[in-house]
Amino acid sequence: METVLRAAAIYLVLMVVFKIAGRRTLLQMTSFDLILLLIISEATQQALLGDDFSVTGAALTIITLVAIDIVLGKLKSRFPVVEQVIDGGPVILVENGNLLTDRMKMTGISPDDVLEAARSGLERFDQIKYAVLEVNGHISIIPRADKQS
Amino acid sequence: MKKEDSSGQAVPIQENLRWIRREWLIQRIGEYVLIALVILGACGLFSKGVLSNGSARSPDGTIQVEYERFGRVESNMDMRIRYNAPVTDRFTVTIGGGALDNLQIQTLQPQPLEAVTIGSDLRLTFSARNTGPDHAIWLGLQPRNAGRIHVTIHGDGHAPARFTQWIYP
């Protein structure tokens, strides 16, 4: 029982902490963030397994984590509210070249971040029809049809 | 051209502004909560720190215990018992109150001459030959269960020092 509870508790803690950290952490993944993730996994590992070195314990932990993930996935597709709470929804940052500063502030995305994402083909905000912060933390750019070069 | 434009506008971006606000609020509050947790943790709310250092003393002052108010399951904590014993060849210290159901003794210094149980209490007898009245016992403990642990410690027949320890899971 303890193994299952440990796994569930760690899952919950990580979910809450990364929810608070926001999507920006996913967006700007530097090499240091990778190291940070490795350290986090190292710190988690002890609490997940404790002094249990058995294959059964490890298997039970893995199965519990995956099962929680599956159940949450099912809940998300069944109840959109759950998905909204856990993953959040897409956020429009730029609409027809206008910066929606209020939303940018709330999501912690700066205009530079949007331009950085748009840089593959666009230079200015008025070339952007929509810039959308997706659930996975990436910024999708939809260019304006008439301004496209 | 026009047609393309209108189909572009129909890009289904379902955003829920109320939830975005709520999410933002949760994050703002959460950031403060995380910082507060770090500061409290550094101060010892989760064992080992200023907030965690406790000391208890028996009513007659013969026993003084320095302990940690907060502990964590399966991590070590220290306890120091000071005892002002009557000058004889040996003295006894009894740890009880059901504490040892939840605490595992990892180290015990000095080694007792005798360790006996009375119910679920542990009575330790130490040698005190050619020493003064002041003695100290150092214990390394490991909590086995989460929750509140009541500890009583008394020396020989004196009144006990009582305290509780809170163990985090």
Image (spheres, coloured by chain):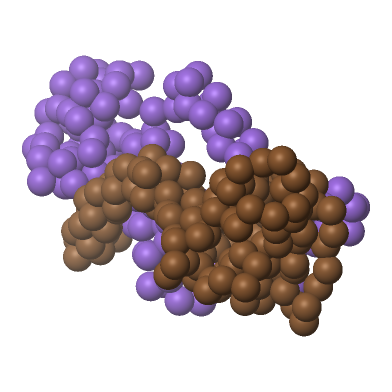
Q: Colour of chain A?
A: purple
Q: Which residue does the image show at 67% across and 62% down from the upper left?
A: B93
Foreground of the two, B75 or A121: B75
Q: Position of residue B153 (x, y in %)?
A: 59, 66
In the image, A38: left or right of B10?
right
Quadrant where the N terminus of chain B is found in the figure: top left
In the image, B35: left or right of B82?
left
In the image, B106: left or right of B150?
right
Foreground of the two, B12 or A135: A135
In the image, A61: left or right of B164?
right
Q: Which residue does the image show at 34% across and 57% down from the upper left?
A: A89
Q: Is residue B155 above or below residue A144?
A: below
Q: Position of residue B85 (x, y in %)?
A: 59, 56
Q: Is residue B127 above or below residue A38?
A: below
Instruction: Report how many numbered discs are placed on residues in the image.
Output: 0
Q: Position of residue A98 (x, y in %)?
A: 9, 37
Q: Colour of chain B?
A: brown
Q: Position of residue A143 (x, y in %)?
A: 26, 32
Using the rendered view, name the quadrant where residue B10 is placed. bottom left
Q: Is residue A148 above or below residue A13?
A: above
Q: Looking at this rendering, what residue extends furthest in the right direction? A: A55
